Image (cartoon, rainbow, N blue to C red):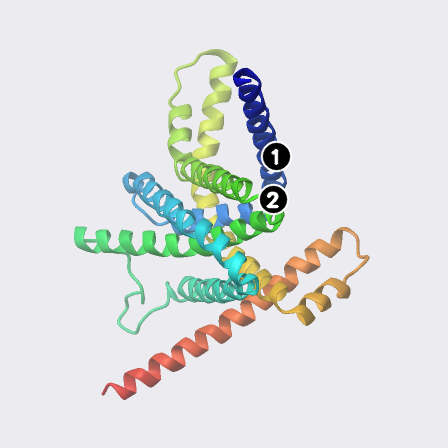
Amino acid sequence: MAGSSLFALLDDIATLLDDISLMSKVAAKKSASVLSDDLAVNAEQVTGMKADRELPVVWAVFKGSLRNKAILVPCALALNALLPAGVHWLLMIGGAYLCYEGFEAIKDKLTASRDDGTGQPKKTKPKTPEELASYEKRKIAGAVRTDFILSAEIIVITLNIVTDAPMLQQVLTLALIAVVMTVGVYGLVAGIVRLDDAGLILQKSKATGTWGSVVRIVGGWLLSAAPKLMKALSWIGTVAMFLVGGAFITEGIEPVQHFAETLFAGAGAWETVATLGIHCLVGALVGLVAALVVKGFTTLFSKGST
C-alpha cells in the first residue's frame, strides 16, 4: 500500500509538472510581444550610465523586478478572485502612466540639446559623485516603476491562461513565468550594455590566421555598432512605452478595440502593422493628455501654495 501510494504521489507530481510546463509554454508564447517591448524599454532605462556602473544598475533593476513580481503574483491572484474587472482597470491606469512616461522621455530627448539662453544646454549630465549617485538612483527607480507596469501585463496574460486551473498550478505557473521572464530580460539587457566590452575583447584577440582576422573584424564591428545600438534602443524603448500603454488603453475600451480590429481586418500582414500603429497613436495621445493634466495640476497646486 505504501509503495502504491508513493507511485500515485509521483504520478500526480509528474502530471502537475507537465501541466505547468505546458501552460508556461503557452504563456511565454503569448507574452513574447510584451517581452520584446520589456527588453527595449529596460535597455533604454539603463542607457547613459558610466561604463563601470552599467551592470550594477542592471542588477539593481533586476532585484527590483523580482520584488515587483513577488508583489504582483499574489495581488493578481487575489484581485482576480475578488474583483476580476479590477485587473483590467488597473492595467489601463498603468498604461496611461507608461504613455505619460513615454511622452516625458520624448520631450526630454527633444529639449536636451536646446540652448537655455546662456550658451549652455538646458540639460547637463551629472558630474560630481553626489550628482552621479542621485542620477543613478533616479534611473533605477524609474526603471523599476516601468518594469512594474510591464510585469503586470505579463502576469495578467499568464493568469488569463491558467484561470481555470487549480490554484496550486496557477501559483506555480505564475511564479515560474515571473522568474524565467525576469532572468531572460535582464540577462539580455546586461549582454546589450556590455556589447562594447565583448567587441574590445574580440578586437584585441591574438588569434592568428584567417580566423584571427575575422574575430578582430567582428570585434571592431561590435565596438562601432554598440553606441548606435544603445542610441537606437533609447528611441525604441520610448516608442515601446506608447505601444504597450496604448495597447492597454485600446484593449480596455471595447468600442476602441472593436474599431481597431475591424478597421484593417483582412489586410493580411499589414493588419498587425496597422494595429501596432493604432496602439502607438492612442498611446501618444494619452501621453499628451496625461502630461497636460499633470502640468495643469502642478501649476494649480504651485499657485495655491504661494
Q: Residue furthest top?
A: 209
In the rendered view, does 229 fall on the left or right side of 161? left
Task: Determine whether, in the image, residue 45 is placed left or right of residue 13.
Answer: left
Residue sitting at 41 percent across and 29 percent down?
A: 198
User: Considering the image in quadrants, where does the N terminus appear?
Assistant: top right
Mark 1: secondary structure: helix
Q: What distance separates the C-alpha of mark 1 from that of mark 2? A: 9 Å
192 is higher (above) or lower (below) than 10:
below
Query: Mark 1 vs mark 2: which is more N-terminal?
Result: 1
**Judging from the image, what secondary structure is the residue with disc 2 in?**
loop
Residue 260 placed where, x, y %? Answer: 70, 65
Mark 2, residue position: 165
Residue at 31%, 83% in the rendered image: 301
Q: Quadrant of the C terminus?
A: bottom left
- The answer to whether residue 295 is visible is yes
Residue holding disc 1: 19
Relative height, residue 229 to residue 18 (above, below): below
- For the image, the number of numbered tags is 2
Q: Position of residue 123 (x, y in %)?
A: 31, 64
Mark 2 surroundings within 10 Å by alpha-carbon count, few (fewer than 14), some (14 through 19), many (20 or more): some
Mark 2: which amino acid? Ala
Q: Image check: 21 left or right of 96?
A: right
Q: Is residue 239 visible?
A: no
Front-lying residue, 273 or 118:
273
